[in-house]
Image (tube, grey):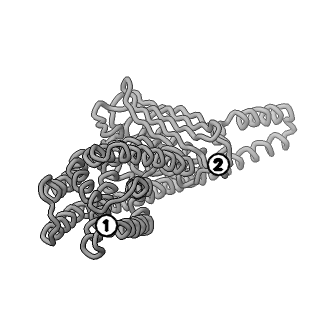
Amino acid sequence: MLVFLCWYFGMEEEMLGGSIWVAALRNVMGAGLMMAVFLLLDRPRLSMKKTIWCYVLFGMAAVVCFSLWYLVDKESFVRFSGMLLLPVMGTFCVRMSRDTLYLSLYKLTIGFYLLSLTVFCGIDAARIWFGEEMWADILIRLVMTVVILFLIASKVRRSFLEGIDYLREEMDWFSSVTVVLSILIAAIVAFWPGRHDFSMFHVVRTVMLFFMAGIIQYTVFQLYLHRGKEWRFQVEKELLETNERFIHRQLELMNESKEQTARIRHDIRHHCLLIEEYIRNGETDKLLDYVKQYREDVENRETECICGNETISNILTVYARRAKKEDIEVAMQAQVPGDIAVRDTDLVVIIANIFENAIHGCMASHLPENKIHIQVTCKGKKIVVQCRNTCGEDIKMKNGVPVSERGIGISSVLKVVSYYHGEAEFSVENGMFIARILLNLPQDQ
């Protein structure tokens, strides 16, 4: 495909003419459009500032190399430059992105399609209306590039990035091949080597092929956009359900506290009656022994405070009590300060879902002894949540994520992890399901 496009564009640009500087300008616009489209739709590995600098430096180096090639050997440049354009730009863009390979190929295909469209419109519009004027071609390309980037930045980018987590999970080889083949078919039919005498029939045919390829691209994009919206709605629903479950658990805990308060009040009444009786009978030694015994009993009672963070303590307390009702042995460790840059609702989503899934896993294992060991620690600018629980042998994994019907809120957990630029890892080792969650805390608390 690239050879055909290169041959056509090279022959057409040779008709329009131009010096080495004009060729460099065309290369700058082409490379800039492809990389700008990719960057607008991408989530880079580095910070945006560093990423932009890398793109600028690489783009300048690529333009210099391709322009020197054009100056040294115009014939080989016309024949092979297009074939090298996408691999060179694509390799760099894929390396700079933290998205999957298939999703990166999809974004590269979009960029290359838009580049092909601007080149075709610039060349043929200059031939039809401007008498093959070289600068008319360049001006048309420049205007189209600005319009395309403006539309992507203002209309497409936000919705694309909102659904990029869904795209990253669902974009596969079939989707990528479908989009690439749509461009390949249009390119082969429109730019097959042969006589390309200028005619309106040739222009109309090429326009229709570009239009049909664009319709396929747009349809695929709208399909994933719609599915991505459904996925986001499902995640929001799971977030609400998680908070609702946690509120119910807190209400249960409050009811238990009321019952415990009533028992304490009842016991205190009996303690007071007994103390009054000791005082009335003048049995001071027995009274002192009784008070001492009562004080030791109070001091030996377990405290409910697990760590310095009240939200985490409440979540662990609520679900630990539920686990103990199911005869599940629970071990908890938490070392998190009270003031951390994580929203309480996000803590509920992460810890409550992980703990509740662990309880479901233990109950589904049907083993005589079930265990849950959960740790929540704060190390520097990172929050680490690790949970190990007894599980059965029927856990299924897809792309490293459990897909068992008993799994609750995993997509919500992944959404929160993505929000904090963290990592999530799930595995099964020696009959124990292991969930590891890492959140990167924002710099500003």
Q: What residue did someone put label 1 on?
A: 122
**Residue 243 percent location from the top left of the image:** 48, 56
Mark in front: 2 vs 1: 1
- Name the residue located 15 percent from the left edge and 53 percent from the top edge: 188
Along the line of sight, which residue is nearer the eye, 102 or 397? Answer: 102
Picture coordinates of residue 358, whole percent (x, y): 42, 38
Which residue is label 2 attached to? 443
Q: Position of residue 202 (x, y in %)?
A: 14, 66
Residue placed furthest toward the top: 430
Q: Nearer the viewer, residue 18 or 182?
A: 18
Front in this rendered view, residue 118 or 153: 118
Give the residue type that dot 2 points to: Gln
The answer, for residue 205, to whether it is visible in the render is: yes
| Amino acid type shown at disc 1 | Gly
Q: Secondary structure at mark 1?
A: helix
Q: Of callouts 2 and 1, which one flags the residue occurring earlier in the amino acid sequence?
A: 1
Whether residue 238 is visible here, answered yes or no, is no
**For mark 1, does the 10 Å Cα neighbourhood hold few (<14), some (14 to 19), or many (20 or more) residues?**
many
Q: What residue is drawn where x is 27% and y is 54%?
A: 10
Residue at the far bottom in the pictured view: 129
Element class at badge 2: loop
Return the x and y of residue 195 as percentages of the image width and height: 12, 58
Quadrant assignment, res 118:
bottom left
